[in-house]
Amino acid sequence: MENINNLKPLKYFMYDASTNTEIKVNDALEVNLDEALKIFFELTPVKGNYVGFVIDNTKILQFMSVGVANSYLLDIPDTDLKGSLQKTTDFEECRSALISLYGGNTAYEIKEVTFKKW
């Protein structure tokens, strides 16, 4: 079986309001998929906390805590369209989206997603 940790370059950026810790997208740090999933799992449910992942230096997938346990705003920005695909969802769907996009599955579909202009 192919090890998906070796498939795509993956970097993360984040903000944690409780510790005032921030890694800006331009300073994103490289991680493997296991580390990325751990970072996402450890995102505290404080409203406004977020973690984002830059996949293959082209795609961004970000998750923001909405202040409720196991509830996240999943956000996929599209700079060409000047907006984002968004959905409020749970940990498992966010995890599945990250694994799928990291593995190169560009056809991964997130059901009931809404496009929001910036």
Image (cartoon, helix red, strand yellow):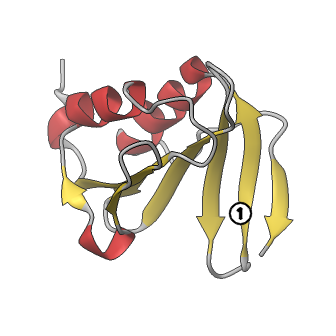
Choose between 99 and 3: the one closer to the eye. Answer: 99
Q: x%, y% of residue 118?
A: 77, 75
> Is residue 45 toward the left or the right of residue 111 in the image?
left
Q: x%, y% of residue 37?
A: 33, 29
Residue at the spot 74% in from the left edge and 50% down from the top edge: 86
Choose between 31 and 3: the one closer to the eye. Answer: 31
Residue at the spot 64% in from the left edge and 41% down from the top edge: 47
Toward which corner of the image does residue 109 lie, by quadrant? top right
Q: x%, y% of residue 105?
A: 47, 42
* Residue, disc 1: 84
Query: In the rendered image of this protein, does residue 27 appear above or below residue 62?
Result: below
Residue at the spot 18% in from the left edge and 35% down from the top edge: 5
Asked if residue 4 can be seen in this view, the reply is: no
Badge 1 crowding class, 10 Å Cα cut-off, few under 14, some 14 to 19, many 20 or more, is: some
> Is residue 73 toward the left or the right of residue 57 in the image?
right
Choose between 15 and 82: the one closer to the eye. Answer: 15
Asked if residue 88 can be seen in this view, the reply is: yes
Residue at the spot 45% in from the left edge and 37% down from the top edge: 98
Q: x%, y% of residue 108?
A: 59, 39
Q: Quadrant of the N terminus?
A: top left
Which secondary structure lies at badge 1?
strand
Query: In the rendered image of this protein, does residue 103 appear above or below residue 13?
Result: above
Query: In the rendered image of this protein, does residue 33 appear above or below residue 77?
Result: above
